[in-house]
Amino acid sequence: MDFLGIENLKARYGEHVVLNDISMTVEKGEIVSLIGPSGSGKSSLLRALVGLLPVESGEVRLNGEIINYRDKQAVKRLRDRLAIVFQQYNLFQNMDVLRNVMLAPMKVKGWPREECEREATALLEKVGLGAKLHVYPDQLSGGQQQRVALARALALRPEILLLDEVTSALDPELVNEVLDSIRLLASEGMTMIIVSHEMAFVREVSSRVSMMAAGSIVEIGTPDEIFQNPKHERARDFVGKILHR
Amino acid sequence: MHSIFGQLPRFLSYYNLEFILQAALTTLLLSISGCVFGFIFGFGIAVLRETTGPLWLPLRAAAVLFVEIFRRIPFLVTLFLVFYACQALNLDISVFAVAVASTCIIGAAFLSEVVRTGFDAIPSQEREAAAAMNFTLAQTLFLIVIPQAWRVILPPTFAFFLSFIKDSALASQLGVVELTYSAKVMNNKGFSPVLGFGAALILYFAISYPLARFGLYLEQRLGFSRYRKP
């Protein structure tokens, strides 16, 4: 049985259909990347999964449990097991880095303060920010902020980590420090769904790659299948463009 | 000019001073009740309007109606509305109590909008992040939104407080003896308007200046700085 199953997921903003019959699965320990042109629904899919974008129809199963997005308690249980990192980091500006990371474990999960602090410190050291515990987000570079956001998501001990264009707002020099942190997680077997425009990185870490266009999944396969031998016209077109840039 | 100085000793009699200071106290109490209770109620309304879901819908609708009505009615009309409403209900309360109730209503209606604007000024992405991490609405507001919102809420709140002290003069229309009313009384007693209204001016200043200073102090304390040192 697949770990995360998405079946015929549909979502729209008013008249505009942003997700059209999305079906895919993610196995435990797998890294599935979503690629495709802007507006193809990659970010919307992640937002729909965590309940930030209302789902119109379709089914999401996590570890056998069918998630009904109209049931607030079910969405809460789901959010308990997923964590999302956003393109714009979305750190809480009114607290230092350490508190940003330990706040949700402490207040939402209700774990003991000392334990949360110890784990938050360890996570921040892991992403290379052990020296910045008591710095405020606006005193950090974009790459550092994004690594804090990564630590914040991990502090919730998610079963699946969703990364929504986490390097798109960063200048090229800072991209690698964030990608290195993600590589580290990949090596530890973290299950992830990654939306990214960093094609070399996607190719390197992904178990499978899902190519999206106009709200639908055009093609899904191993990185080699998608990048070297895409079957669909739309996928060929996209891959051709990004490889010959 | 000579006559003004000539009147001064008689103007400063114990009886007159007591009368004027009593009136100043009334103005102070009216302003404070309007500001304090107005802010508390206004804050409550703003929080109420952040709720979602059908359970809170009736209260939310009532809050919107309240704010939209009383923000559109002149303060003077609110005073008379409350006054006649109390009469119709056979409530035996003083005109001062009517004035206090009115200031609370007006304060709540206006300040709830100030607070709401403050909430709205916090990037929605931070709230989305909080939602995705399963923070409750109360946690999101009190841990993340409100600490950052003071910076936006405080300046217009104190601007409102200051203008509100002056608006409290309208309560004189109900017969509440507050500062402006007392100045008129002194004028009618034959004192020069310079003395009566001059005293009122000084006392209005004495009330509002410390308030303005207090506002500045709070802005520095709570108005969280984006460039705080580590």
Image (cartoon, rainbow, N blue to C red):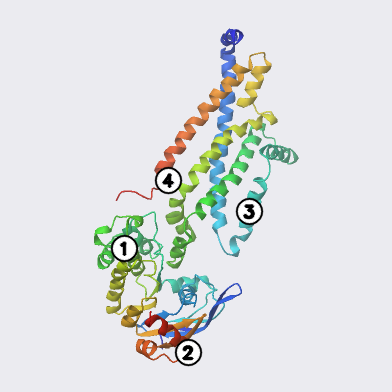
Q: Nearer the viewer, mark 4 or mark 2?
A: 2
Whether the residues at callouts 1 and 4 have beta carbons within 8 Å, the answer is: no
Q: CA distance from mark 3 to mark 2?
A: 53 Å
On the image, the x and y values in percent for residue B153 come to: 50, 47
Question: Circle 2 — which element?
Answer: helix
Q: Nearer the viewer, residue A11 or A189?
A: A11
Tell me, for residue B223, which label it has, or none. Answer: 4
Of the residues shown, which amino acid type is indicated by label 3?
Val
Mark 1 vs mark 4: give the one in front.
1
Between the residue at mark 1 and the residue at mark 4, the CA separation in whole angstroms equals 26 Å
Q: Are marks 3 and 4 on the same chain?
A: yes
Q: CA distance from mark 4 to mark 2?
A: 56 Å
Mark on residue A144? 1
Q: Where residue A102 appears, x then y in whole percent?
A: 34, 61
For the question of whether residue B94 can be seen, the reply is no
- Compute the Cα span from label 2 to label 1: 39 Å
User: Where does residue B189 sit, x and y in percent of width and height?
Assistant: 67, 15
What's under tag 2, amino acid-wise?
A: Glu
Tag 1–tag 3 contact (CB < 8 Å): no
> Where on the picture, by quarter, is residue B213?
top left
- What residue is shown with label 2? A233
Label 3 is found on which chain of the structure? Answer: B
Q: Which residue is mark 3?
A: B64
Q: Amino acid at mark 4?
A: Gly
Q: Nearer the viewer, mark 1 or mark 3?
A: 1
Could you tell me the amino acid type at mark 1?
A: Gln
